[in-house]
Image (cartoon, rainbow, N blue to C red):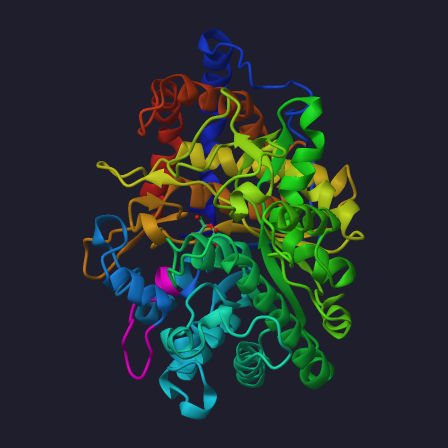
């Protein structure tokens, strides 16, 4: 795509802006959920060195599940058992294993200078253990991807673990359940070996490392509920044991970098935690909302970014539960003093994945028969009736939530540098495909503006914003039925052709403008869409059917004109 082609969207859009403004004033009702002051557009730009990125993960895009010597991961196993919607698997996915140069070209077209992807542990060590052999083709693949990125002036940000644990490690050692309370736990050492190998082989070019992506998911869904891989169902304790091991494995990988590589490679190591903002339903639910956040993000962030130990409220709540349940010890394991020391301060940056907000109510303290992590928190969660929804059942669009969460992290964890490592919105997979993805444009517009408020008004040190995702991909248990991509992927086409959605063109302009500068064509365009975006979402609330709402169709029609002109220029 030539720069002029994509630029013309915003310029051609100027006359359309007038239409939009008139239409929004005439036919759009005032949105009950829209707060004029809180939700106002902030004009201005992010700091000069702000990082704009997009993200993917190995199992979700690579395919090539058994190419060369790659070993199976726990997600290969789950998918091959037919546990995913529509029996989808990641066997081919976006075929990025073969098509990575095209992916890099898409990033280049968007003007992205960073890319967050993950390495598949079993593609490097087929059994998870270095002593059993290294898959040289896997090493070749990641070297080729990294080199392609660097050649195109795109910095790699690498996640070491995005859920695809080698199946053999699960079978041999119980994966992250392995020996969770001792200092000699095998899994820590194995993760350390794997991290060391990656630093050794790729660290000359990779300067940003993320040890774990969303350990909350692996712990609770993988080892507690067991609907995610590796499908271990032990909701009273499994998640606490797994989390304990993950935190220690993270610390191990951090120290290996610190001791053996930092001086020569000069990179950074962090962890990515997921968190929904929890807003109290009534003032009386304020403590419950904090408890909700401490039990989710705090579970990992408190040890790593504060004092090496779990949040106080988790420890006291779990101690009380132990008493009620007649146990002599808490289901929440304890770190030794040495472990606490080694965990505390092991984050050069705070990686945050955020998508949505929940309304929290206090549900203290009804003892129940089968205790589990969900009931341990003593909270109820719900959603306000005027919050619009995306395709994923859990994803409600509440832009101001991200600003509150960023502020919370600043206050709670001593003002760390925060990298937003994922944020995005899903559409349904439907026919015809949603290429004029206006709801996604609105989402990115509203959420990035709230991030800019956190940065410029609240002085939060937000250093990066990463769109999830570069491509439509394998959305875990939902398979290919939910699409998060800036680019559409045709999963029925053996060549997995990629097509830019309107949101990729919008995002390119956002990156180029580094925000919403006063007086720019882009900002004028956004200004005119602003009211529409907030009201479009209300239309969805009132008539959400899983497809485009009436108003958003109308909205798309007008915006489609400049977008189509842009596309014809791209083609
Ligand atoms: C994960 C991604 C996932 C996205 C949308 C995050 O929890 O890191 O792998 O696709 O959310 O569900």
Viewer-proximal residue among 291 and 85: 291
Q: Is residue 411 left or right of residue 186?
A: right
Q: For the point 50% across and 20% down, which residue is it?
A: 386
Q: Decide: is 514 above or below 70.
A: above
Q: Decide: is 236 above or below 278.
A: below
The span picked out in magenta is 59-72
Residue 34 in percent (x, y) is at 58, 19
Residue 302 in percent (x, y) is at 71, 55
Q: Is residue 490 left or right of residue 427?
A: left
Q: Main secondary structure of the magenta part?
A: loop
Residue 560 in sight from this viewpoint: yes
In which quadrant of the rendered view does residue 179 lie?
Answer: bottom right
Q: Is residue 70 left or right of residue 399?
A: left
Q: Decide: is 49 above or below 73.
A: above
Membership of 456 in magenta stretch: no
Q: For the point 33% across and 55% down, which residue is it?
A: 474
Query: How many labels, in total?
Result: 0
Q: Residue furthest top?
A: 26
Viewer-proximal residue among 315 and 227: 315
Residue 341 in percent (x, y) is at 78, 71
Membership of 69 in magenta stretch: yes
């Amino acid at each position: 795509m030539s720069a002029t082609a994509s630029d013309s969207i915003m310029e051609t859009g100027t006359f359309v802006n007038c239409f939009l403004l008139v239409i929004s004033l005439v036919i759009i009702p005032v949105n009950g959920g829209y707060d004029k002051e809180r939700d106002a557009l902030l004009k201005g730009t992010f700091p000069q060195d702000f990082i704009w990125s997009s993200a993917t993960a190995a199992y979700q895009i690579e395919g090539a599940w058994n190419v060369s010597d790659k070993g199976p991961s726990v997600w290969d196993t789950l998918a091959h058992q037919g546990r995913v919607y529509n029996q989808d698997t990641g066997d081919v996915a976006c075929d990025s294993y073969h098509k990575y140069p095209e992916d890099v070209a898409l990033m280049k077209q968007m003007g992205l200078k960073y890319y967050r992807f993950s390495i598949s542990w079993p593609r490097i060590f087929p059994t998870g253990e270095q002593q059993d052999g290294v898959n040289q083709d896997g090493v070749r693949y990641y070297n080729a991807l990294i080199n392609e990125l660097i050649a195109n002036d795109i910095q790699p940000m690498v996640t070491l673990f995005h859920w695809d644990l080698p199946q053999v490690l699960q079978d041999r050692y119980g994966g992250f359940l392995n020996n969770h309370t001792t200092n000699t736990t095998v899994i820590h050492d194995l993760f350390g070996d794997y991290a060391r190998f990656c630093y050794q082989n790729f660290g000359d070019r990779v300067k940003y490392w993320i040890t774990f992506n969303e350990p909350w998911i692996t712990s609770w869904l993988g080892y507690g509920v067991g609907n995610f891989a590796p499908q271990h169902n032990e909701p009273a304790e499994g998640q606490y044991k797994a989390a304990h091991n993950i935190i220690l494995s993270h610390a191990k990988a951090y120290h290996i970098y610190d001791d053996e590589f930092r001086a020569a490679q000069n990179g950074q190591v962090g962890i990515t935690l997921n968190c929904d903002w929890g807003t109290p339903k009534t003032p009386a639910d304020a403590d419950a909302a904090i408890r909700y956040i401490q039990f989710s993000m705090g579970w990992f962030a408190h040890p790593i970014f504060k004092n090496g130990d779990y949040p106080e409220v988790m420890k006291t709540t779990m101690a009380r539960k132990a008493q009620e349940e007649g146990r002599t010890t808490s289901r929440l394991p304890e770190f030794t003093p040495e472990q606490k020391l080694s965990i505390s301060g092991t984050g050069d940056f705070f990686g945050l994945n955020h998508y949505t907000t929940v309304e929290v109510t206090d549900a203290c303290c009804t003892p129940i028969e089968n205790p589990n992590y969900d009931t341990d928190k003593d909270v109820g969660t719900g959603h306000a009736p005027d919050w619009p929804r995306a395709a994923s059942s859990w994803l409600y669009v509440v832009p101001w939530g991200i600003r509150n969460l960023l502020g919370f992290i600043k206050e709670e964890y001593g003002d760390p540098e925060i990298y937003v490592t994922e944020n995005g919105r899903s559409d349904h997979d439907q026919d015809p495909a949603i290429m004029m993805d206006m709801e996604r444009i609105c989402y990115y517009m509203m959420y990035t503006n709230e991030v800019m408020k956190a940065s410029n008004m609240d002085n939060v040190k937000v250093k990066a914003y990463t769109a999830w995702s570069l491509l439509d991909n394998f959305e875990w248990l939902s398979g290919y039925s939910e699409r998060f991509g800036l680019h559409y992927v045709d999963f029925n086409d053996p060549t997995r052709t990629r097509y830019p959605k309107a949101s990729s063109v919008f995002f390119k302009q956002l990156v180029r403008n580094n925000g919403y500068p006063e007086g720019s064509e882009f900002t004028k365009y956004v200004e005119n869409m602003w009211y529409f975006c907030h009201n479009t979402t209300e239309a969805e609330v009132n008539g959400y059917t899983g497809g485009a709402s009436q108003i958003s169709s109308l909205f798309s029609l007008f915006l489609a004109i400049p977008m189509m002109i842009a596309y014809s220029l791209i083609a």
